């Protein structure tokens, strides 16, 4: 079974520039998550999708961050404009999204390491 | 506020010894507690979980203990190997509605295995 795919793996930009990250979840997974992981910290949830609808975006800085999952499969996360404090690894995860059994388990992609100069 | 935290940021153990990584949590309304392993350049990888109505669960070389009285979680790794070197996170898992769950992670403990 293929895992969660993310691209690019690394990105370096200057502050005030824009950047976009792409995620392809595991086939059949209804729920998709974007996390921000600052160096030395645990991942922090930014946004959660169930199919193509947003379940929770309460921790997404909406003045500069946006995310979409138009067809309920792939997703993109955009930052515009970027700030120095946005330097982090952006992780995408997916899960089946069912309540029963252990189908809540989230599978993580390798992440995109963003450096803002 | 709600948080999941760790007692120690780093842990060094001799190869072959047992490792114990601890975690404190503050939110009692969680369905599961999970331990993740994150190697450099990779995303977190599921190790083991424990349902909130259990106090112990064993896997292959790993054991998780849950003490709800003091809101404490621990991960025990038996016969630690060099491949166990990584950052370990505890996380709490709660139902977030619409058939999906959310994870809240702690800060992590870096485990270094000395050959």
Image (cartoon, coloured by chain):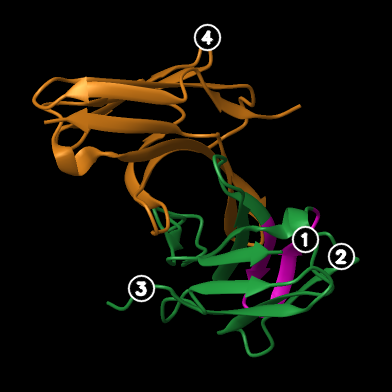
Chain colours: A green, B orange
Does the magenta-highlighted stretch encompass residue A56?
yes
Q: How many labels, in total?
A: 4
* Chain bearing mark 3: A
Quadrant placement of the C terminus of chain B: top left
Question: Which residue: 52% across, 9% down?
Answer: B70
Q: Nearer the viewer, mark 4 or mark 2?
A: 2
* Chain bearing mark 1: A
Callout 4–callout 3 Cβ contact below 8 Å: no
* Dots 3 and 2 on the same chain: yes
Q: Which residue is mark 1?
A: A57
Does the magenta-highlighted stretch encompass residue A110?
no
CA gap between label 1 and label 4 equals 31 Å
Q: Which residue is mark 3?
A: A3
CA gap between label 4 and label 2 equals 37 Å
Which range of residues does the magenta coloring cover?
A46-58
Mark 1: secondary structure = loop
**Nearest to N terminus: mark 3 or mark 2:** 3
């Amino acid at each position: 079974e293929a895992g969660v795919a993310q691209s690019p793996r690394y990105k370096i930009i200057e502050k005030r520039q824009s950047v976009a990250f792409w995620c392809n979840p595991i086939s059949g997974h209804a729920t998709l998550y974007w996390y921000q992981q600052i160096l030395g910290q645990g991942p922090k949830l930014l946004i959660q999708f169930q199919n193509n609808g947003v379940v929770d975006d309460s921790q997404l800085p909406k003045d500069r961050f946006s995310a979409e999952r138009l067809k309920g499969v792939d997703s993109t996360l955009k930052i515009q404009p970027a700030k120095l404090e946005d330097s982090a690894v952006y992780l995408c995860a997916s899960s089946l999204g069912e309540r029963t059994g252990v189908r809540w388990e989230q599978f993580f992609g390798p992440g995109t390491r963003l450096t803002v100069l | 506020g709600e948080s999941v935290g760790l007692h120690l940021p780093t842990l060094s153990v001799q190869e072959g010894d047992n490792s114990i990584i601890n975690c404190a949590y503050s939110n009692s309304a969680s369905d599961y507690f999970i331990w993740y392993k994150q190697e450099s350049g990779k995303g977190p990888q599921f190790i083991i979980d424990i349902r909130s109505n259990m106090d112990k669960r064993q896997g292959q070389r790993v054991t998780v203990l849950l003490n709800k009285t003091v809101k404490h979680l621990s991960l025990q790794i038996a016969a630690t190997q060099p491949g166990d070197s990584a950052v370990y996170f505890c996380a709490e898992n709660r139902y977030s509605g619409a058939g999906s769950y959310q994870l809240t992670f702690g800060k992590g403990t870096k485990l270094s295995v000395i050959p």
